[in-house]
Amino acid sequence: MKPAPRPAIFLSPGATYHADRCEPLVQAVAEGKVELVAWVHRGYPGQVLPPRLLPEISTVGYWNTSGVPGWGLDWHRNEGIELTYVSRGRTIFQVEGERFPLENGYLTVTRPWQKHKVGDPHIGSTRLHWLILDVGVRRPDQPWRWPDWLILAPADRRRLTTLLSHNEQPVWRANPEIGECFERIAQLLRTGEPVAVQSLLRLRINELLLALLDLLTHRNPTLNPHLVTKRRSVELFLQALDDHLDHPWTLAEMAERCALGSSRFTYYCQQLTNMTPIAFLTQRRLEAAKRLLRQTGGLPVTEVALQCGFQSSQYFATVFRTATGLTPRAYRAEGSRASR
């Protein structure tokens, strides 16, 4: 029996980091701005595959767009290793704060914990291919589980895993073979029927992964074992807390999201921040509250408190005054005077 997928590293009410659904792409297709060809699982846009047919494939496909403005893919994460390739045109790709212009022949590789977007803010005129393959990881310290239909020899499989997990470079200049692999997959999706051509699709994906192994081997990227440690998972978790401050975090839940006990999680947090997890969380909430108080003059203080994860305005006011020497209202008023 196939193991159940691991949960996403970050989960909170309304969060979708465990599986981006590409709603802007759905809307752009509906408006005729994009030609989309894709076979999918897990709610992605495209032709839905039968549940038992290649379940490790989250989505595989391509789009053609003439660059009609009005849509882009905002910051998101996916639940699998994502490869994209630009075969025509150009667009902007951003990952973890870095901005990359993509044009014909460029390949991107993003892991599930790498936050990324396409467009700045709109997507340019491109033919963009992709594959998102779920290898069972949501955090960098977890072991990769490749599909059982992957035909790479065990040593090659281990080497590919190391090259992808010990290096997080997101953009590469691809070789012609990778482009040919994506085009063969695109041709199969255009003309084939999923059940009838599943063996051929497996073969094409194996060819693509073998070409990726060859590319990375010859480029010889610097490998960093730190990228697959528990400490790295805690570091990523703490970096993403600002996106989830309204969640009622407890120490136990934060530790659980990183698959650690509370003591070990606290140890790593103190190494990284010189604070306990709860103190760090409170600091991030206070910083977010300061920004909201100064930027949204009409937002009630109670709403600021709730948006930043404080359970009551009274508790928020007490913590805020202890940290700043001012009440939230006085802090807002001081900012208003300074801006005049």
Image (spheres, grey):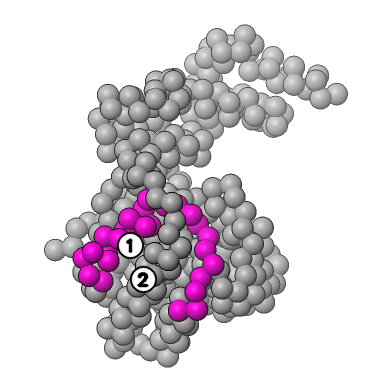
Q: Check if mark 1's residue and mark 2's residue have beta carbons within 8 Å.
A: yes
Residue closer to the observer: 73 or 161: 161
Which residue bears the numbered disc 1? Answer: 160
Left or right, residue 203 beside residue 109: left
Classify the position of the N terminus by image quarter. bottom left
Q: Which mark is residue 209?
A: 2
Residue in the picture at 29% in, 88% down? 196
Q: Quadrant of residue 294?
A: top right
The quadrant holding residue 102 is bottom right
Q: Residue 41 appears in which quarter of the rendering?
A: bottom left
* Residue 248 visible in the displayed image: yes
Q: CA distance from mark 1 to mark 2?
A: 8 Å
- Mark 1 / mark 2, whichever is N-terminal: 1
Q: Residue at x 25, y 30 (%)?
A: 261
Say if residue 303 shows up in the picture: no
Q: Is residue 234 left or right of residue 288?
A: left
